[in-house]
Amino acid sequence: MKKLILLTMVTLSVNIVSAQWTQTNGPYGGSISSIAISGTNIFAGTDGGGVFFSSDTGANWTAVNNGLTNTYVYSLAISGTNIFAGTAGGGVFLSSDNGANWTAVNNGLTYTYVYSLAISGTNIFAGTDGGIFLSSDTGANWTAVNNGLTNTYVYSLAISGSNIFAATDNGIFFSSDTGANWTAVNNGLTYFVNSLAISGTNIFAGTDGGGVFFSSDTGANWTAVNNGLTNTNVSSLAISGTNIFAGTDGGGVFLSSDTGANWTAVNNGLTNTNVYSLAISGTNIFAGTDGGVFFSSDTGANWTAVNNGLTHTYVRSLTISGTNIFAGTDGGGVFFSSDTGANWTAVNNGLTNTYVWSLAISGTNIFAGTNGGVFFSSDTGANWTAVNNGLTNTDVRSLAISGTNIFAGTNGGGVFFSSDNGANWTPVNNGLTNTYVWSLAISGTNIFAGTFLGGVFFSSDNGANWTAEGLTYTQVYSLAISGINIFAGTNGGVWLSSDTDANWTADGLTNHSVRSLAISDTNIFAGTNGGVFFSSDNGANWTAVNTGLINTDVQSIAISGTNIFAGTNGGGVWKRPLSELITGVKEISNNERNIVIYPNPNRGKFTIAQTGNIKSIEIYNVMGEIVYKSRASNTKIDISAQPKGIYFVKVDNGKKVHVEKLVLN
C-alpha cells in the first residue's frame, strides 16, 4: 500500500551562517598504504586520510594528524619514540608522541615524494622520486646519497647489518657504506620491484608481474620462487621466523615456510585482496588493503577486518532512499546507514566487484555500477546479483533511472539501456561520438549524457539518437537538472543551459573540477576538488561552505531530509544540516502553520487549505518535474498513481513560499 508520510514544513530564505561539517562514523576501511608497529602501538598510513593509531590490536583506530599537512602517507618507520611518515609531495614528517603531533623535517630533502623509509641505528634513509636521502639527526637535515644509483625512483628499502638494498623501477641496488656508493645487483631479476624483505642472508624481492625472487648472495644472483603463487603482482612482503608472507594486488596473501619454494593462499575472511602493506608483531599479522586493515593471529589461516574508527574511505557515489543512505566506495563495495551516518554496515554479499562508481534507486531496487558491470539488489543491499547480459562494456561510471527504464553510462562503451531491471541491456549510441559516459541525468523524456572529453549529449527518444550539446569544457563529471535548468559539473567549473539547443553559459567555479552536484529547491550544491560550494541564484554566485571539512576532495554529494552529505576522496562521508546553509529551513509546529493538510495524508490523496489566498500549489518529484499544479485553496489532491519516492509540495501565497517534503511509499 502506498502511504504519504508528512516529514517537515520548511520556509525558504537564503543566508550563510557560521557552522561546520562533521564526519559521520564511517564508512570504515580505506586504502592503507603503510603499516608500522611498535610494541602494542600500530600505525596505519592511508592514501589521503593521514595516519591512524591503534593500541588494541586494531580493534579501534583514532586519526592522529595534527600538523600533518599532507595526508597521503606512503611509508612509515619507527625508531624508539620517534615515528617518521613519508608522504606524497609533502616530504617527511616526524612525531615523538605517538602521532599526536607532527612536524615537517625536510631540510635538504629536495624530492618530497617519499615512497619508502628505513632506519639503521641513528641513520634514516628515505627513498624518493629523486633517489635516496640520508639523515643522521632525526630528520633535521638530509643529504642525497645517490652515487651509482642510475634509477632514482626508489619504492622500497631494506637493511641488514651494514648492507642496504634499494628497489627501484629498474631493479635493485646495493650499498655497504651507508649509501655513499651503490651497485646494481640484478642478475636473473628482470621485473619491476615493489617490495623487499630480509631474513638473515636471504633476500626476497616482490615484483610487478614476476612474483617473488630470492637471493642468498647479497643480491648478486636472483631466482624466481613462485610455485603455487597464482598472483604474481607482489606489492608487499613480511617475514616472521621461517614464514614468509606475500601480499598481492588482487590475489590476497600467500604464505611460504620453505624459503619461497612453495606458496599457499591464506585468504579466509580476507574480503579485500588488494594487499598493499604487511606488518608482523609476534604472532599477529596485519594486512593493509584498499578496503581497510585485516588481522590474523593464526599464520594467516583466518582474517578479521579491524576497522572501527578507521574512517578513511574513498566514497565515489552516494544515493538516498527515505532514511536509508548508501555509499559506493573505491574497493570497499557498498556501505549502508539507516541513522544519518551514525553507523555504517558493509552490504556486499554477492557484490564480486567492490569498486562502485555509481548508485541508483528505484523503489526497493538498488543498482550499483562497478568496473565489473551492474549489480542489483532488492533487499536494501543485503544481497547482490550481477545483471550484465548484453552489457559488453562493464566499466559502469554512471546510472540513471526513469520509470522502468535504466540507463548505464560506461567508460568507453557508451550508453546501455534496460527495461527489465537490468536483466538485459542494449547499446543506444547512435550519434554518441564520445563513448566515455561519466554522468547521466533525466528530465521527463529528455536524457543528458556527460562524457570525458566529449562534452554533453542529448537524447529525447530513450537514447536511440544523440546530439552533441556544444559544451566548451568537455570533461563532464556530473549533471543535475532543476526545472528547465541543466547544470554540468566539469573540469572547468559549472555550466548552465536552460534549453536543449546547445547553449551553455559558464556558471562559476571555473578554477575547480566539479565532481558532483545536488539541488534542493532553488539551491545548488557543488562538490569539487576544493570542497563544497553553495549557490542560491542558479550559479550566478557561489560561496565555499567548508568549515570543519578536513578532506575537501569531494567526490559525491546527496541531500536527505534536513541534512546534506559529502563523500570524500579518502575521508569517508561528512554531514551538515541544511539549516546551517539555508537559514529558515526549520520544522514548524502544527500551531504555527497557516497551511493545513488533511486528513492525515495516506494513499497519496489529501486536501490542502490555507488561511487567505493561494497563488499556486505545485508538487515536484526529485527530478524537479511538476507532477501536480493548482491555483485553488481547499484543493483535493490525488498523486497516488505516482511512483514511490520523495515529493515536494510547494505552496505560494504571494508573500511566502512554504515547501512540504513528503514520502510516498
Image (cartoon, grey):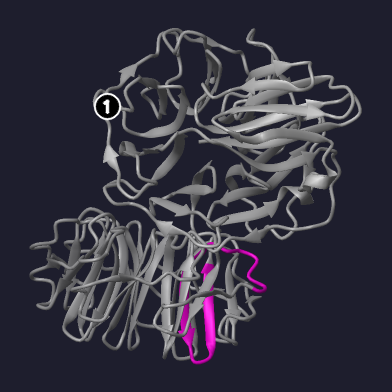
- Tell me the quarter of the picture where residue 514 sits: top right
Image: 91 above or below 438:
below
Name the foreground residue: 445 vs 253: 445
Name the foreground residue: 178 vs 16: 16
Q: Position of residue 248 (x, y in %)?
A: 26, 60
Q: Residue at x 30, y 44 (%)?
A: 384
- Tell me the quarter of the picture where residue 302 sits: bottom left
Q: Is residue 518 visible?
A: no
Query: How many dots with numbers?
Result: 1
Q: Residue at x 32, y 27 (%)?
A: 422
Q: Quadrant of the N terminus?
A: top left
Image: 585 above or below 664:
below
Image: 234 above or below 636:
below
Residue 254 falls left or right of residue 148: left
Image: 309 above or below 42:
above
Name the foreground residue: 165 vs 318: 318
Q: Secondary structure at mark 1?
A: loop
Is 81 part of what is drawn in magenta? yes
Q: Residues within 10 Å of mark 1 (few under 14, many from 20)?
A: some
Residue 627 falls left or right of residue 611: left
Q: Residue at x 43, y 50 (%)?
A: 330
Residue 434 falls left or right of residue 225: right
Q: Residue at x 56, y 85 (%)?
A: 98
Q: Residue furthest front?
A: 599
Q: Position of residue 423 (x, y in %)?
A: 27, 27
Kind of residue indicated by mark 1: Ala
Q: Position of residue 431 (x, y in %)?
A: 45, 8
Q: Is residue 173 visible?
A: yes
Is 592 part of what is drawn in magenta? no
Q: Position of residue 78 (x, y in %)?
A: 47, 84
- Magenta part of the protein: which range? 66-86
Q: Which residue is mark 1?
A: 423
